[in-house]
Image (cartoon, rainbow, N blue to C red):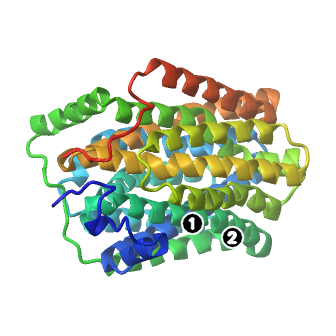
Amino acid sequence: MVTERSGSGGESASNQEVPAALGSLLGLGDFRRLWICDGLMFQGLWMEGLVVGWLVLEMTNSPFWVAMIDFFRAIPVPLAGLFGPLLTDRFRRRRVILVLQSLNALALAAVALLYWGDALDYWHLALASIVGGVVWGLDWPNRRAFVPDLVGKSRVVDAMLLGNGMQALARVSGPLMAGVALAAVGVGGALMTLVLMAVLSVFVLLGMRSDARSPDVPRGFSRSLSRVTEGLRYVRGQRVILGIMVVTVIMNVWAFSHQSLLPVFARDVLQRGPVGLGLLACASGIGSVLGLLLVTRFRRDPRRVHIFTGGALLCCIGLVGFAGCQHFVLAILMLLIVGLGQAGFSSMQSTILLMEAPDHIRNRVMGTLVCAIGAGPLGRIQAGSLATLAGAPVAVASMAGFAILAMVMTILLLPGFVRRVASTPSR
């Protein structure tokens, strides 16, 4: 594959208008199907988090056990991210995604059937969350590594903006749909909606034709293990990539853990029901959509790390403000700020890694990113424990404040991280 400078002409379409440049990617059939499937996946994830969180709150009346559901989902993610490429790199990327999404649909169907049969217990939800974590940990890096195969490495920035746009829209529509479904058809109807969406995602994937796979297929046990250490050494030796990983750990441990406590905020702090919960959860999604419109204007700007770190800091500042809110409208406004910051963080996270990493190690770098994201269980336990002892507002404010401090220390103590990134991707 020919790699071009991200700021050059040709396939990068840098001289095109933004809508035309982004829209032309949707003319690529396999990328369009993957993009739609991503939307269904994220829609389902945001719905599932609220539906299951609300169900657990009704079952246990405990903020701790609500947060622990997210903990169970996050438990397998680090191992799946670190060692998953040893398995997934052996197969066609399309087939890996198809098998994993089918497994996810079966797990959701089992939960729905148990609920309708009045046989659902907490441990069933915990087990389904673990399965969901395994699926996500194997699927997500494979999807991200698939993108350059479908669009060319010179158009990765545009593809990531489209992908993050779909994800941001799902952060709006998913929570709203969850809140409306819970209020209109109850937990059982909401669970069946999740099953139908998962099945639809599988059918969309069936139309893909790409046979792309990793250019460096692992062979033999010892060689496979050496690939893991090779990937970790590469990440450690690249200051920009290492910085991305460190900030990702910080955000997933101390910032994003607030999401597991949204049902507690909605019911116990702001005195709202399922629809209010949906509005709270979608507010940051609306902020992300607005933020992505701003980020799109700087899609060719080489200072991507500045956008990444600035977005992460803004997200945490918004969380501190949200934690202190006693009024529903003000809480919505603070979560809009959270979403604005998250747009910069999430849109540049994968973009920087895919542009910097050579093709042969791309999936392993993305797997390491999943491992960093998988640090989230520590935050879920912390959030649940602090919320039980001191209340959800104290938990969110203190953890977001610590995240700000940790990021500032990372920027100061990791030379070469926040700098002007060369526009030429690694080869």
| Earlier sequence position, callout 2 versus callout 1 | 1
Which residue appears at 50% of the width and 54% of the height? 298
Quarter of the figure with the N terminus = bottom left
Task: Say left or right for 309 vs 67.
Answer: left
Question: Relative to the observer, which residue lies in front, 189 or 363?
Answer: 363
Residue 359 % position (x, y):
20, 50
Identify residue for label 1. Answer: 43
Against 372, residue 348 (above or below) is below
Which residue appears at 56% of the width and 53% of the height? 124
Identify residue for label 2. Answer: 177
In the rendered structure, are the residues bearing label 2 and label 1 in contact, judged by CB atoms less than 8 Å apart?
yes
Residue 322 % position (x, y):
78, 42
Residue type, numbered disc 2: Met
Residue type, numbered disc 1: Gln
Name of the residue lying farthest toward the top:
413
Residue 84 visible in the picture: no
**Residue density around tag 2, few if under 14, some if 14–19, many if 20 or more, within 10 Å:** many
**Residue density around tag 1, few if under 14, some if 14–19, many if 20 or more, within 10 Å:** many
Against 197, residue 44 (above or below) is above
From mark 2 to mark 1, how far is it between C-alphas?
A: 9 Å
Question: Relative to the observer, which residue lies in front, 410 or 137?
Answer: 410
Which residue appears at 77% of the width and 31% of the height? 388
Q: Kindly state the secondary structure of the residue where label 2 is placed.
A: helix
Question: Relative to the observer, which residue lies in front, 116 or 370?
Answer: 370
Which residue appears at 30% of the width and 33% of the height? 235
The numbered dot on residue 91 is none
